[in-house]
Amino acid sequence: MPGFEWLGREEKEAVVDVMDRGVLFRYEFAEKRGDAWRVRQFEEAFAAYAGAKHALAVTSGSAALKVALCALGVGPGDEVITQGFTFVATWEAILDCGAEPVFCEIDDTLCMDPADLEKKITPRTRCIVPVHMMGAPADIGRIKAVADAHGVPVLEDTAQAAGCFLNGRHMGTFGKVGTFSFDAVKTLTTGEGGMVITDDADLWRRASEYHDHGHDHRPVGRGNEGRNFFGFNFRMMELQGAIGLAQLAKMPAMVQTYQKHKNAMLEALGQVPGLSPRRVADRSGDAATFVSWFLPDAQAAARFNKSLADSGCGAVPWGVNTWHSYPNWEQLHAGATPIASGWPFKRPGGADLRFGPADLPNTKELLGRCLSWQIMLNWDDAKIEAMRQAVAKAAKEL
Ligand SMILES: *Cc1c(COP(=O)(O)O)cnc(C)c1O
């Protein structure tokens, strides 16, 4: 999913323009900046691209999750359900709010399993956070139906799915709020950065104020004296806003390129008996940053990947990956924290939070036989041909 491949002249000129104006801060200094508000413009352009009414740029995708959860009112005593296949930031943000993450199985979408979600809901569930992994959607219709039946808001962690649409609608707009990451390896990158989108004006204002020390942001912008509540600082800077605008303009061409490369890979993989691709509901809306497939079992996945690796085309073996999968998050299972009291795993006046490595057997089983390739924008025909040949060779050795 790396937009860094296409960082170029456009981003460079946008950065130089900000430097020439001499204002790095997103608010105030109207005269000095010559009325150029890059972060605000990036918010408006991103909201238009995604089809949301409001957007708030922040410092990272992790910050976007934290700000959105706070704006939803999530805190101690609340449970937040998310999935056992995501980046650690999703549950770190939940813990950082003082709430308790509850982990849900994934299904063959590689995202939240709506049937398991139903089982994990309790009277304390305050938010549901499906994660659209690797550029493609969760089964958001069914997830939304379960959430609506229980009156619980959905926050879509869309960090990995900028540019992904389901039946013409951008991911992150199905739930109450959507969050994005623009970190160094995401499709749209500003180095570090993130975005919160919502159609709810009050939620947007709470998020906007919280991300700026609680400063009053009514009706829009800043500068009113007074603070409505405590907050923090998650403000994006103008340099990032300028880069974001330039990157956003490249999104349609990036997605088109990813789709072209991914289709070539799916075609090659489609020749291999016993191999099934990840379920993607709407191929035409796929952001296509990864191609993922299942083998019949973990041994076959290891054999297949050994052969791919011997050809210089190794895939991500999710069974052993420690970044994204619940069974391999040692720090979570150990309840490891730098905080002396043991927070957030030890809770004053409450039971300790414990997360057993064997708690999500379906997720472990599915990821154990799943392989993915990250699709690169700059693959040329020779590279794609080499990948094709690697697949054909691996198929023979299966
Ligand atoms: C990247 C990512 C994040 C965090 O984004 P940062 O900008 O790196 O803080 C959150 N959730 C998921 C699913 C991610 O992939």
Image (spheres, rainbow, N blue to C red):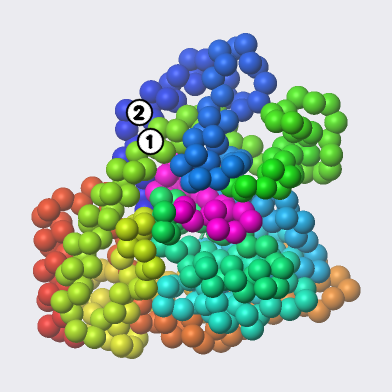
Q: x and y percent of residue 307 in the render?
A: 19, 77
Task: Determine whether 265 is above or below 179 in the image.
Answer: below
Dot 2: what SS?
A: helix
Q: Name the residue under label 1.
A: 249
Give yes or no for residue 184 being in the magenta stretch.
yes
Q: Report the side of 381 relative to 210 (left or right).
A: left
Q: Residue 25: which quarter of the image?
A: top right
Q: Name the residue under label 2.
A: 10
Q: Which residue is drawn at 72% across and 41% down?
A: 205
Task: Determine whether 236 is above or below 51 in the image.
Answer: above
Q: Residue 301: which quarter of the image?
A: bottom left
Relative depth, front residue between 353 and 381: 381
Task: Determine whether 277 is above or below 182 in the image.
Answer: below
Task: Determine whether 398 is above or below 159 in the image.
Answer: below
Quarter of the picture containing the C terminus is: bottom left
Dot 1: what SS?
A: helix
Q: Which of marks 2 and 1 is in front?
A: 1
- The answer to whether mark 2 and mark 1 are in CB contact below 8 A is yes
Relative depth, front residue between 135 and 95: 135
Q: Residue 174: which quarter of the image?
A: bottom right
Q: x and y percent of residue 120 in the render?
A: 65, 80
Q: Visible in this render: residue 290? A: no
Q: Report the side of 149 relative to 386 (left or right).
A: right
Q: x and y percent of residue 249 in the render?
A: 38, 35
